[in-house]
Amino acid sequence: MKLSVLDLVPVIEGGSVGEALADAAVLAQCAERAGYHRYWVAEHHGMQGIVGGATAVVLAHVGKATRTIRIGAGGIMLPNHSPLVIAEQFGTLDALFPGRIDLGLGRAPGADQRIVRALRKDVNRSADDFPADVVELQAQFAGDSRVPLQANPGLGARPELWILGSSLFGAQLAALLGLPYAFASHFAPDHLDAALALYRQHFQPSAALDAPYVMAAINVLAADSDDEAALLASSMDQSFVRLRSGNPGRLPPPVPGYRDSLPAPARAMLDHMRQVSAIGSPRTVADRIAAFCERTQADELIVAGATHDPAMRRRSLELTMAAVCDLVD
């Protein structure tokens, strides 16, 4: 079973952007030592508690700190960018770290229409242009003569392209293009089963991939006991409730009994969003991961999560990998 890591590069309350970036490199080193397959950073903008917006720059920083683990974007929100610019960025990363670069592509802006305007994108273009942008990006890497301006670096680069999704649209596009597919079930679980079935049913083999390949995301936080893990996870819970309440900020410290303190509607919202989770002792985490694998038949899982104390996230990765290896054995 392949396990990978999704990192939002969180800034904790009382911390700084520089510290968050330093912690990202240390987390990737920990993941590499523990045997994780990939380390991905997600693009977000305008959020003071998440600093992965300049995704390619963060990946260059992480790549320099690691040796073997694959590194990539999970993902680049392509409607925010010109395919030419992304080809140049990831062509550069591919030249710096050959054979290690992944490029996951999503069609959401990652925030709201302010992002589109701030990035000076053509406001007449939208997420509906995402399929054409993906094809143009593929053409940039392939050196297709129909591309009016060739990216350099970019020409001949071979990052591993993925389609990301949280609905049926991405599943359909990944199947049509014959690309691997990653589903964001860690925060959008509703269409998981239908999307994976659609992708597998309609997959068309390509030069990139001859059979469907699925990665599913799951919130994972392992600690020595179920109670300790629940306490650590309260930082993530607070952060998400604040985001949905229009009051986002930096990752707060854990609060005992946080979920029980919420009004019923907020608790229901949180429980729904977090339903694809494995939070607890190593045994609990292993059992829930096993059940999720049985449900999805995923080829790979990518674990999401954050802790106010970065050392606890690293400890969680180590406990999780050891528990899963014991389960497989």
Image (cartoon, helix red, strand yellow):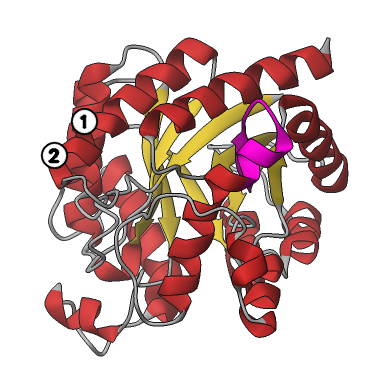
Tags 2 and 1 touching, CB below 8 Å: yes
Q: Residue at x 19, y 51 (%)?
A: 54
Q: Which residues are magenta?
A: 218-230
Front residue of 310 and 67: 310
The residue where tag 1 is placed is 22
Helix, strand or loop at mark 1: helix
Q: Position of residue 296 (x, y in %)?
A: 80, 47
Front residue of 140 and 98: 98
> What amino acid is found at the position of numbered circle 2 in the picture?
Gly
Q: Position of residue 131 (x, y in %)?
A: 45, 68
- Residue 140 within the magenta-colored segment of the rendering: no
User: Which quadrant of the figure contains the C terminus?
Assistant: top right
Q: Calculate the distance from the C-alpha at mark 2 to the C-alpha at mark 1.
A: 6 Å
User: Which quadrant of the figure contains the N terminus?
Assistant: top right
The reply to whether residue 22 is in sight is yes
> What amino acid is found at the position of numbered circle 1 in the picture?
Ala
Helix, strand or loop at mark 2: helix
Q: Tag on residue 18?
A: 2
Q: Residue at x 62, y 21 (%)?
A: 319
Query: In this image, 278 relative to 148: left or right?
Result: right
Q: Position of residue 52 (x, y in %)?
A: 27, 50
